[in-house]
Image (cartoon, coloured by chain):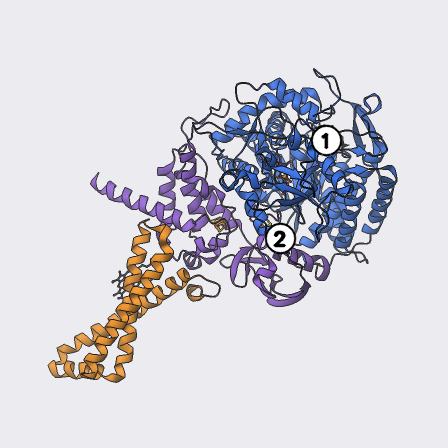
Chain colours: A purple, B orange, C blue
Amino acid sequence: MDVEFRIRRFDGEKSYWQTFNIPVKRGMTVLEGLYYIKENLDGSLTFRASCRMAICGSCAVKINGKPRLACETQILEIGNSLEVEPLDNFKVIKDLVTDFEGFFKKHEAVKPYLIRKDDNYEEPVELIQSPKELHAYYDFTLCVKCGACYSVCPAAATRDDYLGPAAITAAYRFNADSRDEGEKIRLALVCGDNGVWRCHFAAECSEVCPKQIDPAKAVQKIRFKSAIETIKSIFR
Amino acid sequence: MWQKWFSVKGKSLFSIAFSLHRLTGVVLTIYLCMHLAYLTSIRMGKEVFESFIATTVTPQFLIFDILLVLAGIYHGVNGLRLILHEFGLTYESRKSILYVSVAIVLIVWLIASYRMYTFVMGV
Amino acid sequence: MKVQHDIVIVGAGLAGMRAVIAAAEKSKKLSIALISKTYPIRCHSVCAEGGTAAVMREGDSFDLHAWDTVKGSDFLADQDAVEFFVREMPKEILRLDNWGCPWSRTEDGLIAQRAFGGHSFNRTIFAADRTGFHEVHTLYERMLMYPNVIRYDEYFLTSLVIEDGKIKGLTAIELKTGDLILFEAKAVILATGGAGRLYGFTTYSHTVTGDGMAVAYRAGVPLKDMEFFQFHPTGLVPSGILMTEACRGEGGYLRNKDGERFMERYAPEKMELAPRDVVARAMWKEILEGRGIESEHGYYIALDLTHLGEEKINERLPLIRDAAIKFVGIDPVEEPIPVRPVAHYTMGGVHTNANCESPVKGLYAAGEAGCVSIHGANRLGSNSTAECLVFGRAAGEKAAEYVLNADYSHVSNEVYKAEESRIFDEILGKSGDENPYQLKKELNETMDKNLWIFRIEDELKEAVKKIKELKERFNNVEIVDKTKGFNTDLVYTFEVGYMLDLAEVVAIGALNRTESRGAHYRLDYPKRDDENWLKHTLAYYTPDGPRFEYIPVTITKWEPVERKY
Ligand SMILES: Cc1cc2nc3c(=O)[nH]c(=O)nc-3n(C[C@H](O)[C@H](O)[C@H](O)COP(=O)(O)OP(=O)(O)OC[C@H]3O[C@@H](n4cnc5c(N)ncnc54)[C@H](O)[C@@H]3O)c2cc1C
Ligand code: HEM
Ligand code: SF4
Ligand code: FES
């Protein structure tokens, strides 16, 4: 069966739509479709991909208006014509490739690593963590940094220094880890001017996240914590 | 930038709720300003004020009023929904809460519209 | 443009990032650069599912782990390296624990372990079935703590600069702008991963094209044991996505079209958990003998998890369930998964000693790109993420020690100019009538057909001929995309060039090795031949194809015996 791919392209100066018709078999993913075009129709089509098993986060693009991982999206589930565009809220570099540098910087900015006073590189010890404590944060570790959440976030559209759902989720993931001692430090980082209070709970991030990790929930949890801390500090 | 606040293509109900909330917030603010201007007219005398009111409480104006009330109710009810979630509560049932909110908005709005209709039409 | 660093690490997978951390821990004064063609967390290591082996508990011992590894390697592993490896491993697990890795836990909060093929103790540590993913993220996040690490994300390595047997630096293209950057360095660590995309049906990410191996090879560094490629028994049909060995570790069965658990006939003791080469050959034999299950994508074997129950599958194998549902529309809770052996691991790599030092001074290799040789002719499951951790660290530390007493080396402008003109005038500017995608496709077909699980002289010769022809045609390649910034067409062409060189080494190496050992199985020489072939292959680059040398295997405690499971 032939399927029409309408692709939003950008060559560094101008952006335009281009249409390709490609033969599709059952089971073929959008990423395979893009590779088909690159290998057979137009070698200059530019996109990112690596694992093709929905775990590396390279291939998020907008498919019919909704950000998804191209490698886990079945073409025939979408229909017999589809529109592929780069993610919103990111600067486009070329075709479907967008600039992720700022996105990774924001992730870095929330100190997304265990902070422990007794950190010992030479002689590590086994830390005890019950399965229950593990479950308290485990789901939030699954973020693949695909940027889908950031691309639909209205707060990120307003200001490009907003930390965004993924970075805040990373902060929450470590705050909720029983092995961590850095909650205060991270709260200070994510409750500032460009932090959680910019969220308007459009909750679209949770809707589009391909890993169903509910970034909006992480944001609200941190907010609550921050509000409580602030109230406490008034009475202290 | 602001266009993105209102682009709803491919978005879920949550985003649409956000867009509407923002829209109604702005509408309400504009209305508030107008309303204050209206109220200020009482300084020009009771007659002027009454004649102003008389022009607005008319069938022609009713349609605007009903829409305004919709905006107000939506903004209020949705606002309460947001406050609830933004305290980190009931996140898991956000879908049903959204549906319930919309239902409440519609019911309250219909009742209010009926009341306004009967009041203006004098029936 | 030119930049200078003490150590430049190429490749941000498990091995590369572990090396970065080790070097940064060694001294805060070192300036350390990390180059990768993908963002670090998009490296191929995130695909590793099953787990990482280490001796952690009562009942297990270093000697037992070492013996399993050596036996698994069909005695081609260097035993001094293996002994070092097993001893260092437990600490690496604990370090990752201290750095935030969400290891799966036992009820009392200890790090949990499970069974894995070829290991005679349940020693595989895991984080659900996303072990590599969590390890990569943990290392990446830890790495952010060190201010003296400078990342160059999305830079593509094109050549190494080696003068007088000493490393001087390397060149890489900054993908975003398309500029060529010269890195001057006292030491370079290659951690660019394996060469799996030589094959078409493979578990590897699209980006695993053996770049580091090929670049080193062209610069005169020998490659070791490249003919040994591991075939994993269970690749999802048709995409090749890995169905982790943990499926069988958790109790899954393999069945042929008669519903028979055929492993009974091949490895009665270990059954489905025999080492990979044994299981893969058994499955392929079932298929060749007509006991595979037919489908529109060819014959397959059924991986049956249905008896495990939904709860266990959700708890221990969530990714597998998700992938099976998303990519083939099969829910493993209800139906068996269609699988077939699939190209999975590159045992060979850049020749190094047990300290990760290559023959070139200041050049190190670690992870899948290197070949310390702890895997020999066949690697055991969960030993390779482990290798990346231990030898990544070793490489980082050794490089740091070396660099602290070494001077900067200057690379002349000519070298840079020559490389720039090679890339932009000769490769990008060239016109011709071949396209790289077609060549890659033909290469994959050849590899899948002639260098697969069962090898035989005629087919190997055919492959060598075909690869030479492809190399010839490669000179005539024209790149469609002539722009500079983010030119993936150019990158792809480079990768195809690299892969052709490597394929030649693999094919001729396999043709030369007239025995069957581990993953290398010759139908015409079905026996292991310790008398003539208990030795490592080294391939050196020459313009007319590889030149081979052989070096002995280091044996400390374990003399070769027959390998039975
Ligand atoms: C599907 C799958 C599952 C696996 N499961 C397991 C398991 O359960 N247990 C286990 O022990 N092992 C497993 N393995 C093997 C293991 O994952 C790999 O051997 C290991 O991750 C290799 O890591 P690495 O650091 O050497 O390389 P990689 O992770 O491949 O990293 C290579 C890095 O080099 C960079 N690079 C490559 N070329 C260039 C270039 N030209 N310029 C710049 N940078 C470049 C890449 O961007 C990347 O950052 C699995 C492998 C596969 C395919
Ligand atoms: C029942 C009473 C009201 C409630 C519960 C309420 C609640 C809220 C909440 C929770 C927000 C923040 C939404 C967000 O995070 O995006 C908000 C925004 C806003 N409100 Fe209200 N509100 C009420 C009445 C009004 C009135 C009467 C006006 C007009 C004067 C108004 C104007 C606005 C405006 C302009 C915004 C900003 C819109 C935005 O940022 O998207 N609100 N309201
Ligand atoms: S939170 Fe979800 S959508 Fe956002 S980057 Fe992570 S995986 Fe992607
Ligand atoms: S290619 Fe890795 S997530 Fe799609």
Give the image location of residue C391, x and y in percent: 62, 28
Give the image location of residue C193, x and y in percent: 66, 38
Amino acid type at circle 2 is Thr
Q: Which residue is mark 1?
A: C266
Instruction: Looking at the picture, tell me which residue is in the foreground, A119 or C162.
Output: A119
- For marks 2 and 1, the one nearer the N-term is 2
Q: Chain of mark 2?
A: C
Q: Which residue is mark 2?
A: C177
Say what secondary structure mark 1 lies in: helix
Mark nearer the viewer, 2 or 1: 1
Quadrant including the C terminus of chain C: top right
Q: Residue at x 45, y 43 (%)?
A: A140
- Is label 2 within 8 A of ligand 1 (CB to nearest ligand atom)? no
Relative to C373, A184 lies left or right: left
Tell me if I can see residue A167 in this picture. Answer: yes
Relative to A157, B26 lies left or right: left
Q: Quadrant of residue C222?
A: top right
Relative to A184, C446 lies left or right: right
Say what secondary structure mark 2 lies in: loop
Q: Circle 1: is it few (<14), some (14-19), or many (20+) Cα within 10 Å?
A: some
